Structures are given as C-alpha cells and as structure tokens.
Image (tube, grey):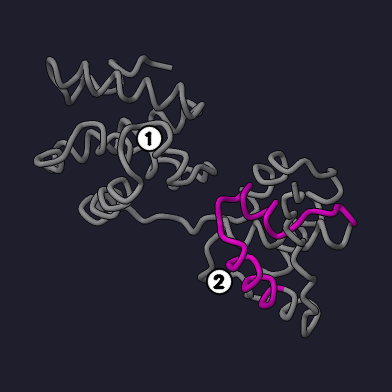
C-alpha cells in the first residue's frame, strides 16, 4: 500500500500534508486499521478538504471523523469510543464532525451489521465458540423477523451474546456483557425483552447478579 503521504499528497501541500499524514499514521497504528480503511479515510479527508470543511476545524478532528466514516462505510467494526481513545478529540466532537462529513459529501452509509460486533464482545468476556455461533444465529433470526430494524448494532450484539451465554450456561452477567460492549445494563435488559419476545414469546428476565458487599471489619 502507498504511504499516507502518498495517499494524501495529491490534495494537500506543505505543513498541512505533514500533520495530516502523521494523524493518519497514528490512527492506522493505534486502531490497527486495514489498508482499505486507511485508503478510504484518505479519500474522505481529501474530499472534505476540497469542500472547505477543514475551516474552523482541526486536522485531528476531521481526520478522526474521516476514519470513523471510513470504518462505517467499509463495515469495519470500530465505534466512536475506539476512535476517541486513539485521538485527543472527544467523541461528541467526532460525532458532530462525522455528521457534517456525510451530509456535505452526500455519503450513503450502509446499515451496520450487529453480527460484526459479536466476535469483539465474545473475545473480551471469554466465551466458547459454540456460544459465539449461537449469538450470531440469534441475530440472523432477529433480522429475518425484522426485530433488529432501527436498533443500535452494538447493543443488539451485546443482547444476543447475553442470551447465547444464558442458553449455553456460560454464567455471564448483564454487567459483564455491558462493560465489554460499552453499553448500559439497562439497554441490554430492554433489548433482551424485545429480542426474546420476537423469537420465543414473553421473556422471563433472569435476576441481576448480586453485587458483592465489602466484608465487615
């Protein structure tokens, strides 16, 4: 693959090119971005630059939002928190710049597939391969029954993983899965109701795992 300087060089000059290349290199290394995402990030950044979107915005924030947009566009399972962690920019600013980017450049984003996030959650909480496959099957069933339309893909993936853990006796709590997916326990509980209802009928909610109290001194 071409270097980031070569990818950006056609539309950026001088000091701007050096800083933009450094930012793209940093994002590639910190997020382990595949070549196709790096190339798409560079293309989006150059288009944004030509439209004058860099005015009143930092190179860092525009590059970060371009990387997030490139991930969404290529179906690469990275979220705003991942991009925030690789930069000095808050996720609210990245999200704001991302919305401007797709609006001004008229980018049509494909709907994110929650199946893409199952492996990531599964690795973090350490579950068996059969449970991962079960979670994927749950999501595919939900899609066929149109139970996943309009739902946040990460929270759906987390809910499917939790349900698969429950069915396979993995012993993972709401909190375990919520922390791995960076969503709230309440979100998973609410999604769980709807997901199980669409697949099986009325759900019986399992109890929350009791929090350990510190031992009395």
Q: Label 2, label 1: how many angstroms apart (C-alpha)?
A: 27 Å
In the foreground, 13 or 156: 156
Vertical position of residue 188 compared to residue 22: above or below: below
Please state the extent of the stretch shown in magenta in the rendering.
Answer: 169-195
Counting other residues with Cα less than 10 Å from the Cα at mark 1, is it few (<14), some (14-19), or many (20 or more)?
A: some
Q: Is residue 121 left or right of residue 135?
A: left
Q: Residue lying furthest bottom in this view?
A: 202
Q: Nearer the viewer, residue 81 or 197?
A: 81
Numbered label attached to residue 102: none
In this view, the residue farthest toward the right is: 169
Asked if residue 206 is among those painted magenta in the image, a careful observer would answer no
Q: Which mark is residue 149?
A: 2
Residue nearest the viewer, comparing 191 with 41: 191
Residues at circles 2 and 1 in contact by the CB criterion of under 8 Å:
no
Q: Position of residue 122 (x, y in %)?
A: 72, 45
**Magenta residues: mostly which secondary structure?**
helix
Q: Earlier in the sequence, mark 2 or mark 1?
A: 1
From this view, report whether residue 20 is shown above or below residue 40. above
Instruction: Name the residue furthest front.
Output: 217
């Amino acid at each position: 693959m071409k270097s980031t300087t070569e990818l950006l060089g056609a539309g950026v000059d001088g000091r701007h090119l050096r800083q933009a290349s450094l930012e793209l290199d940093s994002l590639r290394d910190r997020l382990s971005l595949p070549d196709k995402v790096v190339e798409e990030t560079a293309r989006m950044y150059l288009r944004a630059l030509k439209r004058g979107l860099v005015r009143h915005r930092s190179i860092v924030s525009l590059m970060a939002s371009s990387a997030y947009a490139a991930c969404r566009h290529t179906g690469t399972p990275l979220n705003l928190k991942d991009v925030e962690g690789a930069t000095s920019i808050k996720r609210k600013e990245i999200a704001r710049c991302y919305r401007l980017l797709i609006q001004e450049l008229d980018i049509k984003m494909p709907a994110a597939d929650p199946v893409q996030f199952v492996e990531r959650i599964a690795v973090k909480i350490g579950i068996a391969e059969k449970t991962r496959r079960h979670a994927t099957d749950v999501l595919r069933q939900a899609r066929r029954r149109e139970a996943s339309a309009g739902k946040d893909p990460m929270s759906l993936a987390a809910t499917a993983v939790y349900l698969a853990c429950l069915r396979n006796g993995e012993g993972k709590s709401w909190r375990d899965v919520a922390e791995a997916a960076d969503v709230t326990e309440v979100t998973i509980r609410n999604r769980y109701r709807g997901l199980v209802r669409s697949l099986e009928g009325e759900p019986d909610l399992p109890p929350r795992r009791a929090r350990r109290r510190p031992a009395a001194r």
